[in-house]
Image: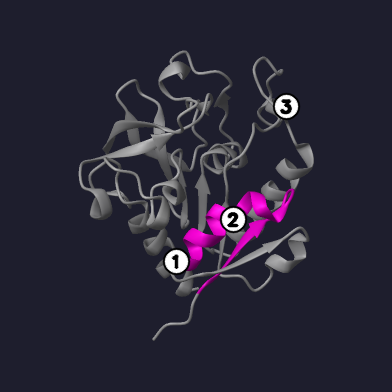
Amino acid sequence: MSRAAQIFLYCYGEPALLDNYVKALTAAGACPAVHRDTAAAVGCGALLLPGGYDSDPALYGQENTACRRIDLDRDRAELALIRQFAAAGKPILGICRGHQLLNIAFGGNLIQDLPTKADHEDTPEGDRLHETSVAPGSFLAPLYGAGAVVTSAHHQGTGRLGAPLRAVQWTADGVVEALVHESLPVFGVQWHPERQAYGRARAGAAEGALLLEWFCALAAEK
C-alpha cells in the first residue's frame, strides 16, 4: 500500500477557512499540512493553492480596475511556494484563485472583470453550475471525458496564458476552466472540486473526488 501524500496548504488566515479543502483531501487519501510558516512545506509531496479573493494586478503589470480584497502577503507567500515546488518537480494543483495565481506565476495575466461575469459569479443560493468542454488527451479527459458540468463562483478569469501553460477546459463563452504546464506536474482548475465531492457532492455536477484522488495519487509518488 502506498503512503498517504503530504499536501501543503498555506494558512493565510484562520485555519477554518481551509476546512473544506482539508476534509476533501483527507477523504481523497492525503495528509493535508496547513501552516502559516512556508518553511513547513519542505518535505511535502505536493502543493494545493486554494480559492479566495483576488491577487494584486501589479503582479501582472496592470492597474487595479476591479480587484477585491487583495492580500499581497498571501500573493507573495504562494508565489514563492509555486517556485519552490515547481523547481523540485513536485505536483501543484491550483483551484479558482489558485488556478489564476499559477497563470500569473508563469508570466500570464488575468481579466480583472469578465464581461460575462454574471454567468460565472455565485448566487445567494451558492455556486452556479455550467457545462464545459475538455481537451482530448488532457489530464481531465480520462476522468471526465469530453466535458463536465462544474461549479462556478468567480468574476475574474485567465487572460494571456503564461508561455509554458496551455488551456485544456473551457466554458461555452471561452473562459478557461483548466490549464496545465507543458513539462511540469502543474495543474489549475477554475472550478471547485472540493465543493462537488464527498459530503458536498452536487446533484448534476461532475464528481470532484475523481480529480482530488487523481492528484493525491500523483503526489504520493513524489
The kind of residue on which mark 1 rests is: Ala
Mark closer to the chain start, 1 or 3: 1
Q: Residue beneath label 3, please? A: 58
Q: Residue beneath label 2, please? A: 19
What span is colored magenta in the figure? Answer: 5-28
Q: What numbered label is drawn on residue 202?
A: none
Question: Is residue 21 magenta-colored?
Answer: yes
Q: Closer to the camera: disc 1 or disc 3?
A: 1
Q: What separation in Å lies between label 2 and label 1 (alpha carbons)?
A: 12 Å
Q: What numbered label is drawn on residue 27?
A: 1
Q: What separation in Å lies between label 1 and label 3 (alpha carbons)?
A: 37 Å
Q: Residue at x 29, y 43 (%)?
A: 203
SS state under label 1: helix
The kind of residue on which mark 2 rests is: Asp
Quarter of the image that includes the N terminus? bottom left
Q: How many residues crowd around disc 3 within 10 Å: few (fewer than 14), some, or many (20 or more)? A: few
Q: Nearer the viewer, residue 36 or 94?
A: 36
Rendered view: 198 above or below 45: above
